[in-house]
Image: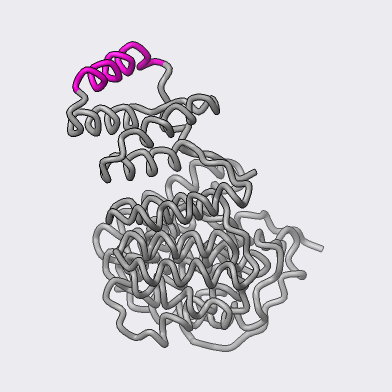
Amino acid sequence: MVWIPYEISMVVASRCFRILLRRKGTFIFNSSLVPGLGTHVAIGHYPPHNYFSSFLGNYNSLATQASPDAEEVTDEVFNQIIATYQTSPKSSKERCNAYVHKLCKAGNLSMAIRLLQYLRDKNIFIPNAYNTLLAAAAERNQIDLSFQIFKDLLVFHGPLSSTCYLNLARSCANINDSTALVRYVKEIAVLAFPCSTTVINRIIFAFAICRHIEKALLIFHQIKSFGCKPDVITYNTILDILGCAGRLDEMIHEFNSMKEAGFVPDFITYNTLLNNLRKVGRLDMCLVFFREMNDGGIEPDLLTYRAMIEMFGRSGNTEEALRLFSEMKQRQIRPSIYIYRSLVDILKKAGKVDLAVSFLEEMNSSLSDLAGPNDFKRKRG
């Protein structure tokens, strides 16, 4: 038996693969026949049997749009990466990402797709390059391409960064076909199993960040049709979306639906309700949920006290605001500069200038001990 050097075998294989692509032929590929070419999927399961056929079909239609000159340059870069990948994978990946960035900046996404397609066939997956391509596709609102890249990242790379989710959401800015959007997200949910709910939660959150409120709500209302079960994080996200949009009746409705579904609200749930109700001056509702929170054995935190202190201060009940501030310190919850400023403002408006000055001096003398950003990130018990 004659052994062929790895670099040569990879180049030969790539040539054969490209011929098949250009001829648009149908072929069966068995990865088990190629040593070292694993079938590992980071999410915990192998993609559906038709995933690779759709992968090739979707990319092939885009990758064949390149000019002969651009194709020759890409082939040269591909061969350079293949030749050096085994000995210097880091530099090869950097070279690939730099070239993909150059292609995307020039608007030549088809050649970037072609390069990544070639490398993917050699079991070389470079996440940063895919992220670059995803960002470029999002800028151009190329929805089909964005979802395909996102699915490939999900399958071959595993847990994704927030930037990936945001780029996916940005690509959907101009989509008006709700049926198509639901279909796209359902495909992602299937690929993400058994982490489907986590992935869908992050998609909903990304859509909310991008101000695609109706699209985020659409995905939420369709979540069960994706084979997913919403969790407390799902509901907390939806409550915040509705609250920030000023849709308080819907927020309360979803909160009640959450409890009817058997979910136990946590401190994030109540803080979300209190903060959004505080903004519109609904002291009556804040009191209801604050009492419910205490009755349920959920301890208020810094954000809870800030919302309630500001709420009482706004209503002119300075005594109750001061009582809560004292209670907060007794529970050894460090005040933040925001709470001090609120109290000072409340007291000034109530005509209690001397007391306001006293709190201002107290704040200035304890600046180094005040709660910082990390104190606002309380973890679930």
Quadrant of residue 354 in the image? Answer: top left
Whether 337 is drawn above or below 58: the answer is above
Residue 70 appears in the figure: no
Residue at position x 62%, y 83% in the image: 50
Query: Residue 158 vs residue 305: left or right?
Result: right
Give whichever of 294, 157 is nearer the camera. Answer: 294
Residue at position x 31%, y 59% in the image: 103
**Residue numbers of the magenta segment:** 353-368
Does residue 362 show up magenta in the picture?
A: yes
Quarter of the C terminus within the rendering: top right
Does residue 274 show up magenta in the picture?
A: no
Whether 379 is drawn above or below 42: the answer is above
Residue at position x 64%, y 61% in the image: 9
Give whichever of 302, 139 is nearer the camera. Answer: 302
Q: Position of residue 374 (x, y in %)?
A: 47, 32
Q: Position of residue 347 (x, y in %)?
A: 24, 29
Quadrant of residue 238 in the image? Answer: bottom left
Residue 53 appears in the figure: yes
Q: Position of residue 217 (x, y in %)?
A: 41, 73
